[in-house]
Amino acid sequence: MTSPWPFAVSTLGMPGLGLDEVCRVAKNARCDGLELRAHPGTGVRAGMGHAALAKARGLLAWAGLTALSVAGYVKIAADAPDDEVLAALRADIGLAADLGARFLRVFPGGDGERDWEPAARRLRAVAPLARETGVRVLIETHDSHPTGVAVRRILDATGEPETTGAIWDVLHTWRHGETPAATYAALHGHLGYVQIKDAAPDLTPVPLGEGDVPLTEVRAALAEGGYDGWISLEWERAWHPEVAPVEEILPAARAWAKDQPISEA
């Protein structure tokens, strides 16, 4: 299968907006889903009460949006006690399940690519809960494991393909010298979704097609590999408040996912 792929946007691109405004922006841009950042400022966080959860589910339903994932911040290879990491993991899995999200994003967060053992051990420990709730835990290509090959080592060591997987952040794999074809080959069969973005040489976010990220090669790797998952725009305005509002970036990003000219987005 090739594109069009279902398209989501991360709430990272809408700092300061409540979930009602986030849903309005995504609905107006004809998004299919949302990547929900787990952060107090977004209104989505572990421990939010029943009323807040019900309101969030209602807003998503009103906008016709799928809760693609909860983008959590747990570092599964962190130098921290297992009990601490596992408690945070279980809380975020519960949050994703309560919101109807199919995925939970985690970071590697180790000291190097060889830090696969604690990550694998912790993912195995939460596998029964992930299986029970139907939430798949996805490792983003990030920090200590920024390439598809590095993340695949953790997944292979974990041995839980039904409850674990990967998010391909196209910026990080490119920055660390891995070609899109190599990333897809490493993560094929494990991809939950793909985060798209573009950046200038200094890594400042720019609209798709105006930076150095090899998005044409990413599209080719996905299409040739028969990828049939989601595409999500991660516009890092929370970290770069000087860049344009996400509303200005969404049309071209949606067009990329839907394989349309920008004028049709």
Image (cartoon, rainbow, N blue to C red):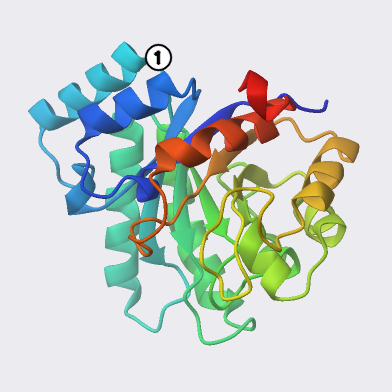
Q: Is residue 144 above or below residue 6?
A: below
Residue drawn at the location 39% of the way across and 20% of the way down: 27
**Quadrant location of the C terminus in the rendered image:** top right
Please state which of residues 34 and 255 is positioned toward the viewer in this rendering: 255
Q: Is residue 45 visible?
A: no
Specify whether 63 is left or right of 185: left
Where disc 1 sits, the SS reads: loop
Say above or below: 262 vs 129: above
For the residue pair 117 and 93, the one nearer the viewer reads as 93
Report the residue at 63% width, 48% height from top: 208
Which x, y percent locates residue 163? 55, 44
Q: Nearer the viewer, residue 148 or 211?
A: 211
> Is disc 1 surrounded by few (<14), some (14 to 19) or many (20+) residues within 10 Å?
some
Up/down of 147 relative to 127, above or below: below
User: Image check: 107 left or right of 202?
Assistant: left
Residue depicted at x 33% and y 58%: 238
Q: Residue 173, image x and y in percent?
A: 69, 66
Based on the displayed image, in which of its 4 quarters is residue 132 positioned? top left
Residue 200 seen in the current view: yes
Q: Residue furthest bottom?
A: 111
Residue 207 vs residue 45, the one in the foreground: 207
Q: Which residue is mark 1?
A: 64
Give amino acid for label 1. Answer: Gly
- The answer to which image quadrant residue 139 occupies is bottom right
